[in-house]
Image (spheres, grey):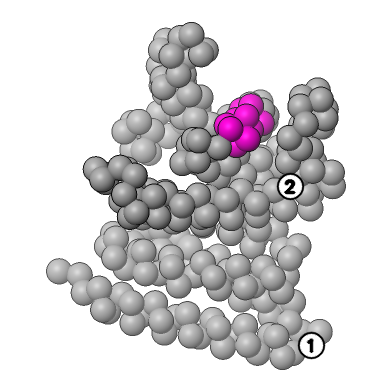
Amino acid sequence: MSKPWVAHATSRARGACLLLLLATALGAGGCAKLLADQTAELMIRTTPAMESEPDPVIAEAAMLSGLKTIEGLLSISPKNEKLLMTVTQSFAGYGAAFVEPEWVLREDFFSDEYLETQRRLQGLYRRSRDTGLRWIELRHPGLATLLRSQVKDEWVEALPEALAKLSQRDVPSLFWTAQAWGLLIRVDDENFIEIANMAKVDMLMRRVYELDPDYNFGAVHLYFGMVNATLGRELGGNLEQAREYFEKAIAVTDGSYLTNRYF
């Protein structure tokens, strides 16, 4: 039986060590960025161990201990692409894995607890989306401004042209930003401004599909499978196309990645 207090004690100890490194970095003048980059590299290398953790209590505690530390490292080294990717992935990943199931399974709709969990999810996904846009802007100045624009005449034609200039090396920034943005829209479904942004998410995902359709275990196939399966035909959904996308997603790993099979 797992012991939550052991997980949290381990989490606090690990967090304390990393915060000590951060404190050292902040007081080291010109060495701060170098130490932040080295600490980030060490944390990123430990990610596979966390992802393979079978105990959900330990996994959640470990992830919680790292979120603010990684964000703190990014504040010291704001152009570190590995940190930008990790923050973009991590806040959305934590929300989807540990907060959203609690929200989805609640039956007390519109209670204070239900709405607070929903607001918390929105905050987690928004932080991931915003960091992803910073990452895209670092690679391609002006593109994030275009993505943030709410004036349709400013982006509806310019955005496809801008995305067409990107290459396969841009796939991670496009995919993880689009994923976080899509999750945000799903849990903020009364925000008409965000709902209108779904067209941008589709454009980002379609560019990923063109550049590297098998990226991240074929997740972009899964995305379009879900879109076609959940939208009614009158809104553009197509169950036959959904089946084709799901089958492509499964084929990427010969069926060994069970998430694709589950969906």
Estimate the x, y position of residue 184 in percent, counting from the top left.
52, 43
The residue lying toward the viewer, choosing from 235 and 49, is: 235
The disc labelled 1 sits on which kind of residue? Answer: Gly
Q: Residue at x 40, y 69 (%)?
A: 62
Which secondary structure class fits the magenta region best? helix
State left or right for residue 130 relative to residue 33: left
State left or right for residue 207 relative to residue 4: right
Q: Residue at x 49, y 35 (%)?
A: 189
The extreme left residue here reads 1
Residues marked 2 and 1 touching at CB (< 8 Å): no
Estimate the x, y position of residue 8 in percent, counting from the top left.
33, 77
Q: Dot 2, how many residues are within 10 Å of its Cα: few (below 14), some (14-19), or many (20+)? A: many
Q: Quadrant of the N terminus?
A: bottom left
Q: Residue at x 21, y 74 (%)?
A: 3
How far apart are labels 2 and 1 at the CA level? Answer: 28 Å
The disc labelled 2 sits on which kind of residue? Answer: Ile
Disc 2 secondary structure class: helix
Estimate the x, y position of residue 150 in percent, counting from the top left.
73, 35
Q: Residue at x 55, y 37 (%)?
A: 191
The residue lying toward the viewer, choosing from 100 and 115, is: 115
Q: Earlier in the sequence, mark 2 or mark 1?
A: 1
State left or right for residue 153 relative to residue 88: right
Residue 193 shown in magenta:
yes
Q: Can residue 106 be seen here?
A: yes
Residue occupied by mark 2: 136
Q: Quadrant of the C terminus?
A: top left
Disc 1 secondary structure class: helix
Q: Which residues are magenta?
A: 192-202
Estimate the x, y position of residue 165 in percent, counting from the top left.
82, 32
Label annotation for residue 29: 1
State left or right for residue 62 relative to residue 6: right
